[in-house]
Amino acid sequence: MNISSRTLYWMTSVLSLVAAVGAMMHPIPAVAEERAFLSKPEIQERLVGKAIQSKNLQSGAVSHWAYHADGTVDASRTGLGKATGTWAIREDGQMCVTMVKRTGCRYWFRKGEILANADTNSPEAPVVAEVLFE
């Protein structure tokens, strides 16, 4: 079988187009960055003594937090005012805050450039909040 150069050119062009369309319809998934959960010393180094802004991903509420070296924490949120409480970090890296007779605990992690927290240290746990340093 003898194929002319023009026919060969069109066949490779059509095959390239088919491959491109196929790649768009079935893209290769990007490798998701893994969560790097913070240890107790990393949490102390990154959060204590720094002012942070926390955005709850479910409600969109933005609050401001300051964890102090003496184990106290100050928080404020528009519409809810200010509150003071205490914080503690367990050996497994779970940070717990007690405020207004209620305790809430979260695990902190990095994912790329993002610092965030979740209710459990499962890699699939929904992100509760992402934070920025003020």
Image (spheres, helix red, strand yellow):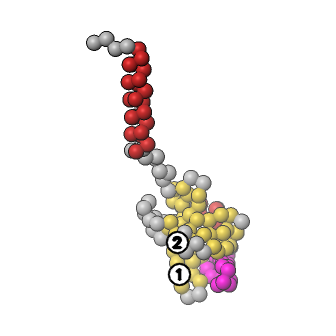
Residue 35, x across and y down, in percent: 50, 56
Q: Which mark is residue 25?
A: none
Question: How far apart are the two marked residues, 2 and 1, measured between alpha carbons?
Answer: 19 Å
Quick one: 31 or 10, which is closer to the camera?
10
Q: Main secondary structure of the magenta part?
A: strand
Residue drawn at (55%, 74%) of the image: 59
Q: Quadrant of the N terminus?
A: top left
Name the residue at the left extreme: 1
Residue 106, x across and y down, in percent: 52, 71
Residue 78 located within the stretch drawn in magenta: yes
Q: Which residues are magenta?
A: 69-86
Residue drawn at (59%, 83%) of the image: 99
Quick one: 107 or 90, which is closer to the camera?
107
Question: Residue 18's image quarter?
Answer: top left
Residue 79, x across and y down, in percent: 66, 84
Quick one: 116 or 73, which is closer to the camera?
116
In the picture provided, is 24 more to the left or to the right than 101?
A: left
Image position of 37 with respect to 18: above or below: below
How many other residues sit within 10 Å of disc 2, few (<14), some (14-19) or many (≥20)? Answer: few
According to the picture, the residue beneath numbered tag 1 turns out to be: 103
In the picture provided, is 51 more to the left or to the right than 56?
A: right
Residue drawn at (43%, 46%) of the image: 29
Task: Give the amino acid type for the residue marked by disc 2 in the picture.
Answer: Gln
According to the picture, the residue beneath numbered tag 2 turns out to be: 58
